[in-house]
Image (cartoon, rainbow, N blue to C red):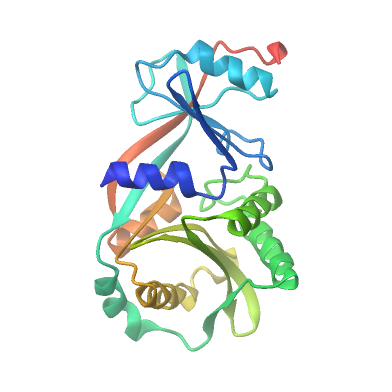
Amino acid sequence: MLNKLKEFYFNHTSCFSERFEKDGIQFLFSKYVKDHYSNIAVVDSSSNLSLAEAEFKERNLNPSYYSFEKPTKDFEITYTDDFLFLEDITLLYKKFSRFKSKHVSLQEVCSKELENEFQIINNDCYSDLSAENPYPDLDNFAYSNSVLEYKKHETETTTKIYIIKFNKTNVGCINITIKKDLCYISGLAILKEYRKTKVFSVLVDILKILIDNNVKSIFCVTELDGYPDQLYKKLGFKSLGVAYGYKNKTFKKEKL
């Protein structure tokens, strides 16, 4: 199952807009985001990293590697991803449907006006510098652009973007990408001041949408041991594998 999740993540997630293989290495780049999360070379112990480094130099980017093998001491780990999987969403739906709050709802992003609202609330949520936010250095508006762009041009998947509302107030957002009976959940963000309310009952709405679309299983990729990671595990998600984002300690920025 982990291989199926990796194939989905590398080929159908919105943060990557350019995908290709060269010299036996899979490259994933973003035309919107220039950070180390969205521009990576997927490698293993047999990969020639000097060839990968050359590709990044041509793009004026610092090399960023991604592997399910822990790197040696010559490399610096910049983040650690946990691939979380929930096999049967109907069980979770039945368990939590009785906790649904009438004050919490979803609004699907289906107009230019709502796209703007989505970008604003996404930025507000991820601008939080608390320990609960594992991505404080993320370019929030660039990430939103990536999601919206992917949605316009996807062919093998269906992406739905939602604004989370508490009464009539925008308090968060979430994206779901569906391919057959599997769904990838990303960008779940809620304003800090609403995280201890019943806003998380919005998960019931998401599960109902997925069930209506014949989805059986869901997965997400989160920073290992971060707040979202712990939350999903409490809901019953299981870790199927850990991936490392890392960089070469000896790479000199002045080479760019």
> In this view of the protein, can residue 225 be seen by the observer?
no
Instruction: Please state the horizontal and vertical placement of residue 45, each as a whole percent of the image.
Output: 35, 17
- The outermost residue toward the front is 155
| On screen, residue 94 above or below 7 | below
Q: Residue at x 29, y 44 (%)?
A: 2
* Quadrant of residue 96 within the rendered picture: bottom left
Which quarter of the image is occupied by the C terminus? top right
Q: Residue at x 41, y 41 (%)?
A: 81
- The outermost residue toward the bottom is 102
Q: How many marks?
A: 0
**In the figure, is residue 192 to the left or right of 208?**
right
Q: Residue at x 75, y 72 (%)?
A: 113
| On screen, residue 2 above or below 22 | below
Foreground residue, 67 or 181?
Answer: 181
**In the figure, is residue 245 to the left or right of 7?**
right
Instruction: Please state the horizontal and vertical placement of residue 188, each as a whole percent of the image.
Output: 51, 61
| On screen, residue 211 above or below 102 | above
Instruction: Please state the horizontal and vertical placement of residue 83, each as a whole percent of the image.
Output: 35, 46
Foreground residue, 89 or 238?
Answer: 89
* Quadrant of residue 194 within the rendered picture: bottom right
> In this view of the protein, can residue 77 be seen by the observer?
yes
**In the figure, is residue 45 to the left or right of 37?**
left
* Quadrant of residue 181 within the rendered picture: bottom left
Instruction: Please state the horizontal and vertical placement of residue 70, each as a whole percent of the image.
Output: 35, 25
